[in-house]
Amino acid sequence: MRKIKELIIEKLILLCGLAAIFFVVLIFLFLLKEGLAVFKMVSPSDFMFGKSWYPISEPPKLGILPLIMGSLVVTFGAAVISIPIGVGCAVYIAEIAPGKIKEVLKAGIELLAAIPSVVLGFIGMVTLVPLVKNVWHLPTGLTALSGSIMLAFMAMPTIVSIAEDALYSVPKNYKEGAFALGATHWQTIWRVLLPAASSGILAAVMLGIGRVIGETMAVMMITGNAAVIPQSILVPVRTLTATVAAEMGEAVVGSEHYFALFAIGIVLFIISFIINVTADLFLHRKQ
Amino acid sequence: MKRNPHLTQKIAFFLLLMATLLIVVPVGLIVVIIIQKGLPAINWQFLTDIPRQGMRAGGIFPAIVGTAYLVGGAIVFALPIGVLAAIYLSEYSKENVLSRIIKLAIINLSGVPSVVYGLFGLALFVVFFKFGASILSGALTLGIMILPIIITSSREALESVPDSFREVSLSLGASKWQTIRNIVLPNAIPGILTGTILGLGRAAGETAPILFTVAAFYLPQLPESIFDQAMALPYHLYVISTQVPNVDEKIRYGTALVLLLLVLFMNLVAIIIRSKLRKNKKW
């Protein structure tokens, strides 16, 4: 009797162990199920590279190039801001900050990671957006630049914590060797630690960028939501994620618009899949 | 000309300090601004009243209740699956292709954009299972989203229980499951709790997954069953900041503050449990 009970429990454990695989596959299948229907109306290349997104005009124009460009511009801006600052902060925390201050800084980074994106979006709306508007004398502060700055913040906890781990995992004798040869602390960091931790730092950067591409609420609240191909970083843009979030509420289930939004979901899923698998490869290469 | 390495070091360290301050100072400012401007809005009525006058007055009680239901539902779903999955990974699985694929799946699950979870919840729970936009659909969607957090932290907690504990139990004739249930799990509870609370905090703050699966724009009454729509704090904040004109700034900041405090409180609890755990380690 006890044997049977334990057998059942162990099967249940195995089943739950497989749950993560099950859900990833399930998510992808349901995105495909609802999203692939759009390709009956528009070819995949017209969908990906079509220059106009007018999903509710008659007939609807379902080209997501403006949205892809919107995501790219915002993500590029966020990467330019967050990579140097994030990696710099990781080096400072891992190598320079004294014990107590280190704990405070780490708590601060954790705090940032915990703030819900809708709260950051709100704060961005009331502080950053007017600031960007006034500094560049723009008609509106709801621009790609505002989105980039806000998203850079959201990427930083990821970049800092993973890069910091990568720096810690560099064997101690590398550092001692450099010191013994008369290198200064900075020379050791720059010439020894950073190169040795490079694959982990690369993974940190990739995961940070993944976070940026997938971010939805803050970006929807502060980038102005104009689905046109951006000519500069100081104009309103609309990202892939914001489009789905803003329009799904109005899309009729089973309409072309609905299918197209799911197809955007497929694109986002594939992007995040590629980023996560590649970053994982980098993280495991060092071992 | 030869550069002075010590001067270079000074400049470099100064820049690194600046980079750190560029992150930490704004974080502090954000929290201070929200507390400072939100605190005057918070009183008993704000927390316990329904929204009135098209959300321009009154309180946020239905949104608080809705978030509580969603978070509770998500954890009821995700905790057992997550802990059992962690037990599998830490106690049963071997280093092989299957466990590698499971780990990759967990990483991917945690990397899927939150709005994609919203789409998935819409397609599976709202449309396919016909739960409609309801607390049930939203809680299940959030539950799947926080699964990786719970699995990862539970697994770490289980793996940190020393093998000697298991060996003693097994040598006394206990079966593998008895050992896990009576020895390994009790010692891993604080770590599992930490992960659970972090998951709760994440679920409480997410907006995109509940946009199409549960969230009601304006519903000045409390949900009566899990098949009802509900308001939720993060969505309510989104609505009153972007969709409704002329909302008193105080109400916006007040709502942001309640949400922020809720999430930070959970994170604080998790951090405290974790640091106690590190201090009290018996091994």
Image (cartoon, rainbow, N blue to C red):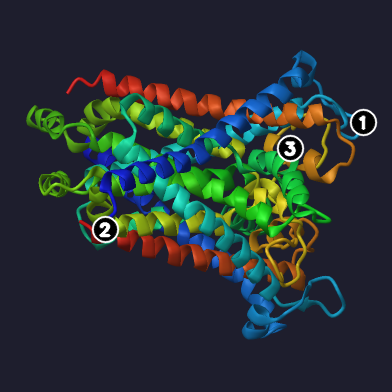
The spot of residue A183 in percent (x, y) is 18, 48
Q: Is the C terminus of chain A in the top left, top right, bottom left or bottom right quadrant? A: bottom left
> Circle 1 is placed at which residue position?
B53
Q: Quadrant of residue A205?
A: bottom left
Q: Name the residue at the right extreme.
A: B53
Q: In front: mark 2 or mark 1? A: 2
What residue is at 80 percent from the left and 42 percent from the top? B217
Position of B211 relative to B25 (above/below): below
Chain letter belonging to callout 1: B
Q: Which residue is mark 3?
A: B237
- Residue type highlighted by circle 3: Leu
State the residue at coordinates (24%, 30%). Answer: B184
* Identity of the residue drawn at 33% across and 48% down: B8
Residue B31 relative to residue B87: left or right: right
**Residue A31 relative to residue B17: left or right:** right
Distance between mark 3 and mark 2 Cα atoms: 44 Å
Q: Chain of mark 3?
A: B
Q: Secondary structure at mark 1?
A: loop
Gap in Å between the C-alphas at discs 3 and 1? 16 Å
Q: Residues within 10 Å of mark 2 (few under 14, many from 20)?
A: some
| Badge number at residue A195 | 2
Badge 3 vs badge 2, beta-carbon distance below 8 Å = no
Query: What's the distance in space between the residues labelled 2 and 1, CA to CA?
Result: 60 Å
SS at mark 3 in the image: helix
The reply to whether discs 2 and 1 touch (Cβ–Cβ < 8 Å) is: no
Res A248 → quadrant: bottom right
Q: Are marks 3 and 1 on the same chain?
A: yes
Name the residue type under label 1.
Answer: Gln
Q: SS at mark 2?
A: helix
